[in-house]
Amino acid sequence: MRFAEYIAEQKMPKDVPLKYVVKTFTSFGFEVDRETPHVIMKNKAGKSITLPNHKQMKSTTLRKAIGEAGLDRDEFLKRLQKNR
């Protein structure tokens, strides 16, 4: 099943390119603070999230990062679809 089909069904995608994940978190007000083996993103309120610096992000890791950021999963997936 293709990425767009996962989003259309509102399921968590299996593998998402990191650049789209970063772009989507940016749309929620997060900015890249630093890149090491992990990408650290922070928002103006001081909340930070840590993402592995790999080409693809697994669904479980993405789910955890969305929760860490305190975001709604469905809203995140809608914005992720727009950012692709």
Image (spheres, rainbow, N blue to C red):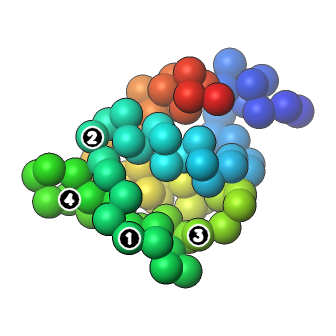
The nearer-to-camera label among 2 and 1 is 1
| Mark 3 in CB contact with mark 2 (< 8 angstroms) | no
Could you say where residue 8 lies in the image, as x and y percent from the top left? 68, 19
Indicate the amino acid at tag 1. Arg
Earlier in the chain: of badge 2 and badge 4, it is 2
Kindly identify the residue that appears in the image at 77 percent across and 24 percent down.
5
How far, Cα to Cα, is label 4 from label 1?
14 Å
Q: CA distance from mark 3 to mark 4?
A: 19 Å
The quadrant the C terminus occupies is top right
The disc label shown at residue 47, or none: 4
Q: Position of residue 72 (x, y in %)?
A: 36, 35
**48 above or below 27?**
below
Decide if residue 69 is on the left or right side of residue 11. left
Q: Which marked residue is nearer to the observer: mark 3 or mark 4?
A: 3
Label number found at residue 29: 2
Q: CA distance from mark 2 to mark 4?
A: 10 Å
Q: Amino acid at mark 3?
A: Asn
